[in-house]
Amino acid sequence: NVITNTGTLIMNGGQIIQTAAGSISYSVDNNSGAADAIFIMNDGLVYKESGSAIRMFCNSTTKENSITVNGGEIYGSYAAIWIQLPGSSAQAKKATLKVNGGTLRTNGGYAFYDYTYGDIFDAVHYTLNGGTFEGYVFSYGANIDITGGTYNAAVEIEQSLPSVVSVSGGTFKGGCYCYGDNASTGYITGGTYFVEPEAASIANGYEAVAEQNYWVVKAA
């Protein structure tokens, strides 16, 4: 790794570049196994030529693993950010991702995604208020609140276990979907969609109104 963060890292500019090949080296490895790992990105470039640029290694039920992106660009050929729950004991490992601005970019892969080896997502929270997501957004069941941002590929949440999903804004060019045994319904109350939202996903009292080649969800 270029940086393994086990404290507080604030990036206001410059570049963090990882050129090593392979999937187990990162530009920033945010590791909360022994201490709070807090990364705040205000500007600059985090770049991984091959693989994922940032890993959130979320291996604690008590320590914070938190990333806030306010600006700048994160690029990874496979994923800009990977959230990993490495345990296999059905523990609620903590993770918080907040995106207020900036760009998460990839080469046909994921703007961000998560994966668990057996831990659960009860204490995993994503808040997406803005920014540009140049790649898929995928979660296995985190709690997600989307209020804004531009999503140039699909947003998909697989809810094998119950979680809270709320979408009140944003521009979705590839659709926004929940599916699985505990798929949320009625979670959309706003936003602009270039793929018509499924009727079951729209909250009571709201509707998807066609506007030329897109739909806007608004109060009925």
Image (tube, helix red, strand yellow):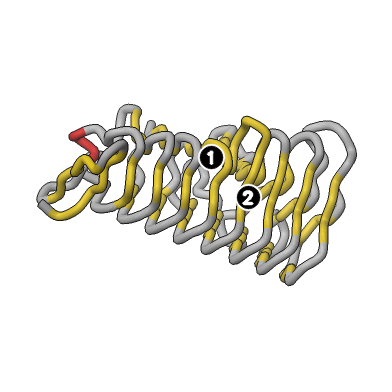
Q: Residue at x 47, y 44 (%)?
A: 151
Q: Which of the two discs, 1 and 2, labels the residue nearer the N terminus?
A: 2
Q: Residue at x 48, y 38 (%)?
A: 139
**Above or below, comparing residue 66 to residue 181 in the picture:** below
Q: Which residue is mark 1?
A: 119
Query: Is residue 167 placed above or below 111 in the rendered structure?
Result: below
Task: Give the percent coordinates (x, y) of residue 40.
Answer: 66, 67
Q: Is residue 163 left or right of residue 52?
A: left
Residue 118 position (above or below residue 95): above
Specify the amino acid type for callout 1. Answer: Asp
> Between tags 1 and 2, which lies in front?
2
Are the residues tagged 1 and 2 within 8 Å (C-beta)?
yes
Q: Label 1 to label 2, Cα distance in Å?
A: 10 Å
**Percent coordinates x, y for residue 217 in the rendering:** 23, 48
Q: Residues within 10 Å of mark 2 (few under 14, many from 20)?
A: many
Instruction: Give amino acid for label 2.
Output: Cys
Residue 106, horizontal then vertical, whole percent = 66, 39
Q: Position of residue 10 (x, y in %)?
A: 72, 70
| Residue visible at 71% across and 46% down in the picture | 75
Residue 57 visible to an observer of this rendering: yes
For residue 75, the mark is none
Q: In this view of the protein, which residue sits in the foreground, 90 or 196?
A: 196
Q: Is residue 9 left or right of residue 125?
A: right
Which residue sits at x=53%, y=59%? 99
Quick one: 152 or 29, which is closer to the camera?
A: 152
Q: Which mark is residue 58?
A: 2
Is residue 96 visible in the rendered image? The answer is: no
Left or right of 163: which side holds 30? right
Displayed quadrant of residue 172: top left
In the rendered image, the residue lying farthest to the right is 20
Q: Residue furthest front?
A: 212
